[in-house]
Amino acid sequence: MTNLIPGAEPWSHHGEGPHGALVVHGFTGNPGSMRGVAEALAAAGFHVEMPLLPGHGTTVDDMMPTRWADWHGGAEAAYQALAARSEKVVVVGLSMGGALTLRLGADHPEIAGLVCINPATQPQAPEVVEMIQGMIDGGTDSMPAIGSDIADPDAHESAYEATPLAPLLSLVQDGLAPLATEYPRITIPLLLLNSPNDHVVEPAQGDFLAEHYGGPVERVMLERSYHVATQDYDKELIFDRTVAFAQRVTA
């Protein structure tokens, strides 16, 4: 793998217990943002798979040709690997990783629990899609970065320094638009963690998911954190609540 960003390595852990946790990072991010969550679940005895999604963790040029189907495929493959050695599986995702978590929940009703941290859940308005498409048609391939939205000045997310537009359009059109119609039929228990001060995914997207979700929703507000809450002031709260939820739904 070329130019892997330090800390962006995928991680596979064989736990002491019978159950597993799949941990999924966000758009333009990498496993570094979710390592604390993965390690907390491993410390609690879970098998853990934390994949590096296609096109991520190296350079933004590597991400340009990738699309929703690639990231979904990466998450699905990691889920299958984990399910093969686990009695029950919990899936945890941040941002786009939250959308992939919900996609897996829609496809695999046998999953024991879903944890979504500031998830992307809603298709964008037509004018936003048109704007992105117009930029692409005009020859622009990227826009400023969305990474490292963190309140803690001592923390930094090693995400890409730009946002690739064609992959972003695929996330919105191929990922979120079809997914949004699926929420009412997903009945897997959901732990939803939201930052009211999120500058990447509007907090209203969490409200949308909670209102349309078909199963039980446990909601936690991350009052001190921005979008990458897993590296922010509320990270220990996220770790604790995620582990407690995972233990409960797999008991």
Image (cartoon, rainbow, N blue to C red):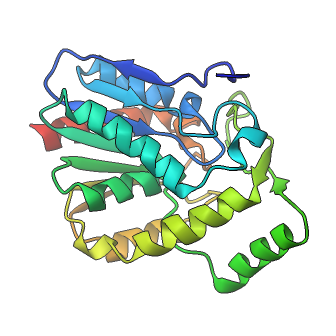
Vertical relation: 126 (above or below) 155: below
Q: Position of residue 143 (x, y in %)?
A: 83, 57
Instruction: Answer whether residue 208 is visible to the viewer in this image.
Output: no
Residue 230, can we see it?
yes
Q: Residue furthest left?
A: 251
Determine the residue located farthest toward the bottom in the rendered image.
126
Nearer to me, 201 or 27: 27
Q: In the rendered view, would you say 116 is above or below 232? A: below
Q: Quadrant of the N terminus?
A: top right
Q: Nearer the viewer, residue 10 or 74?
A: 74
- Identify which residue is drawn at 68% across, 29% down: 155
| Residue occupying image coordinates x 69% and y 44% | 63
Q: Position of residue 132 (x, y in %)?
A: 76, 71
- Taking depth in this image into account, of 104 and 113 the one nearest to the observer is 104
**Residue positioned 56% across, 60% down in the render:** 196
Give whichever of 146, 1 is nearer the camera.
1
Q: Which quarter of the rendering shows the C terminus? A: top left
User: How far across and down, in percent of the image, does residue 136 sit?
Assistant: 82, 67
In the rendered view, tell whether residue 129 sits above or below residue 219: below
Left or right, 47 with reference to 140: left
Q: Is residue 186 left or right of residue 149?
A: left
**Residue drawn at x 67%, y 35% as measured from the top left:** 152
Q: Is residue 122 left or right of residue 147?
A: left
Q: How many marks?
A: 0
Instruction: Please state the horizontal and vertical placement of residue 118, each as a whole percent of the image.
Output: 50, 54
